[in-house]
Image: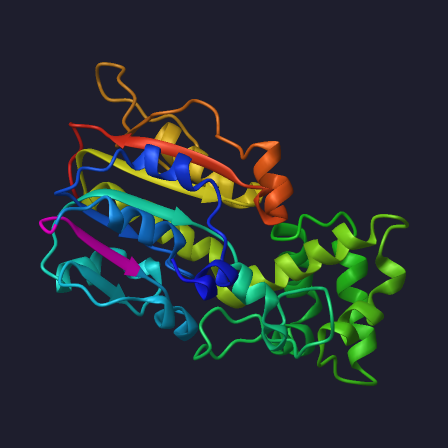
Amino acid sequence: MTESNKIYHVPVMLAECLEGLNINPDGVYVDVTFGGGGHSRAIFEQLSPKGKLVVFDQDPDAKNNAWEAPNFHFVAANFAFLQNHLRLLGIKEVDGILADLGVSSHQFDEEDRGFSIRGNAPLDMRMNQNGELTAERIVNEYEEGELIRIFRNYGELKNARNVAQTIVSKRESNSIKTTQDLMTALEKCAPKFKDHKFFAQVFQAIRIEVNQEMDVLERFLTQTANVLKPGGRLVVMSYHSLEDRLVKNYMKRGNLEGEIEKDFFGNVLKPFDEVVRHPIVPTEEECERNSRARSAKLRIALRKEQHVKK
């Protein structure tokens, strides 16, 4: 890995992800969140010339970290379209899928992207720079009820209504155009001594709405059982409870709601068995090296033999 790739994104729980995938050198693997290529490069190094790696990333910046090889394919698309793009490549089944959800270090650190509460940047937050919806549009154009919904559902803010009302009131006199504008507008809403967490939750909520992250994750998860071979591995790393809840439900119960469905004989209907019952978390040492690892949770599941493809 080049020095620039290390700066772009430090791969979290790299060894644990590789172990979770249980790589077959001749197998076909997919990294749906390529980013800086840290996880992908490590997977690729374990493959033989017969093996194949397909990576997805909708951020044009990520393609700069790709490399040339006959058995490496970069797909410039959102991983919500996983199955379609694999079919276009002539791939019906794969041996393993890795998803490292959330925002890359590069996206956080690129000031003009507007993901970080540090500094002052345009309210953008698009992972795909060609997307039409921006954070600025949400903050300045969404109705109060819509703002309450995203702050309550995606930011898990207890004072979601107050935050939404404050934004609507502030934007009547002046448009809220930058990250600093937004934070200044919401200063009085921030709990004392917990302002950092509050603003992180506000930004998370807006970012999830901009990129439709929960919808994308739901669409991705429901496709994984259709493209993984029996015995194939699904390895997903999440960074907040909303993502982790969906991943947990799907791996444990076979649906996004976490409801138990059984057949006539009382067997639970689900496409996966969990490899680990509880999520794997990074070591304290890794968290000290890379602060962005601190909230990571890694879940691993094995594709069962009996599953009717849709």
Q: Is residue 168 above or below residue 271?
A: below
Work out which quarter of the rendered image holds the C terminus and state it.
top left
Q: Is residue 301 left or right of residue 212?
A: left
On whether residue 222 falls in the magenta region, the answer is: no
Q: Is residue 257 above or below residue 273?
A: below
| Outermost residue to the top | 265
Residue at 46%, 49% (x, y): give it. 11
Q: Which residues are magenta?
A: 49-55
Work out which quarter of the rendered image holds the N terminus and state it.
bottom left
- Asked whether residue 172 appears in the rendered view, the answer is yes
Closer to the camera in the image, 255 or 281: 281
On whether residue 53 falls in the magenta region, the answer is: yes
Residue at 27%, 15% (x, y): give it. 266
Quadrant of the image occupied by residue 136: bottom right
Rendered location of residue 184, percent (x, y): 84, 71
Rendered location of residue 299, percent (x, y): 42, 34
Rendered location of residue 224, percent (x, y): 27, 45
Q: Is residue 104 left or right of residue 256?
A: right
Rendered location of residue 243, percent (x, y): 50, 45
Residue at 34%, 38% (x, y): give it. 18
